[in-house]
Amino acid sequence: MQTITSEILRAKGVASATLLPVDLSVKAGESLAVVGPSGVGKSTLLRALADLQPHQGEVWLEGHPQGEYSAPEWRNRVLYVSSEAGWWAGRIIDHFPVDETSLHTDMQRLGLSSSLCRAVPERLSTGERQRFSLLRALYHAPEVLLLDEPTSALDEASTLAIEAMLEAWVQQGHALIIASHDTQQVKRLANNVLTLNKRA
């Protein structure tokens, strides 16, 4: 299949038992918001795009089908972040591909104390973990970032700081797909909106 230069991710007929077929496309430098009522399948769609859930339909990354990639490679390039991401190592810093000093500037931008690098994830608040999970995702440099209610536990200042970081990242030529119930966040972040509907 010929590589598509500006289109980063495309999906056709992605569906499951709880998700009606979805077609979508997102280009470099674009943000797509996925909206709809609870239970409509927003998380299911994001997990299917990330190859974390069995699904019907097809997904392409830069013109190449999902099946051409190993599961770990695809999931590194099309990276899904849930509202409460998992943590597997002893300290927060152990999850990052950089040293503690390199991380401090970005932590400060998100209102995170430098001492939290050495903290056990379970000792952090939900909002602190949300901010660190976003930073962790950005530091792994995916082509497409799939965010599922990424600021659900954050106050307005922290939410706006996260959004500013995401906007700068998208402007570097990446693609963002975000599922959100926050209509104002959708207006601030998204170039396009995809509305999902429930089965009749």
Image (cartoon, helix red, strand yellow):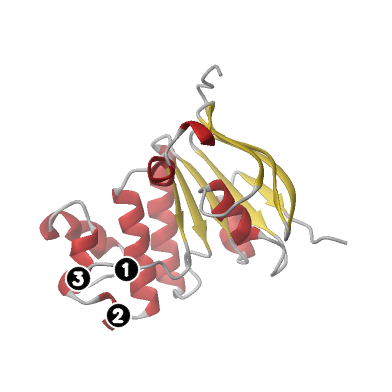
The number of discs equals 3
**Horizontal and vertical percent position of residue 73:** 38, 40
Residue 86 as seen in the image, left or right of residue 6: left
- The residue carrying pointer 3 sits among few (fewer than 14), some (14 to 19) or many (20 or more) residues within 10 Å by Cα, namely some
Identity of the residue furthest to the right in this view: 200
- The residue carrying pointer 2 sits among few (fewer than 14), some (14 to 19) or many (20 or more) residues within 10 Å by Cα, namely few
- Mark 1 in CB contact with mark 2 (< 8 angstroms): yes
- The residue carrying pointer 1 sits among few (fewer than 14), some (14 to 19) or many (20 or more) residues within 10 Å by Cα, namely some
**Horizontal and vertical percent position of residue 185:** 56, 60
**Horizontal and vertical percent position of residue 51:** 52, 48
Q: For the point 43% across and 41% down, which residue is it? A: 74
- Mark 3 in CB contact with mark 1 (< 8 angstroms): no
Q: Could you say which quadrant of the image residue 191 lies in?
A: top right
Q: How far apart in space, not on screen, are marks 3 and 1 (Cα)?
A: 9 Å
Please give the residue where the numbered disc 2 appears in the rendered image. 122
Q: For the point 32% across and 65% down, which residue is it? A: 132
Task: Name the secondary structure under disc 3.
Answer: loop
Residue 119 as seen in the image, left or right of residue 177: left
Q: How far apart in space, not on screen, are marks 3 and 2 (Cα)?
A: 9 Å
Q: For the point 56% across and 47% down, which residue is it? A: 49
User: Which one is nearer the viewer's eye here, 81 or 180?
Assistant: 81
Disc 3 marks a residue whose amino acid type is Arg
Please give the residue where the numbered disc 1 appears in the rendered image. 87
Identity of the residue furthest to the top in this view: 2
User: Which one is nearer the viewer's eye here, 35 or 142?
Assistant: 142
Q: How far apart in space, not on screen, are marks 1 and 2 (Cα)?
A: 9 Å
Disc 2 marks a residue whose amino acid type is Glu
Disc 1 marks a residue whose amino acid type is Trp
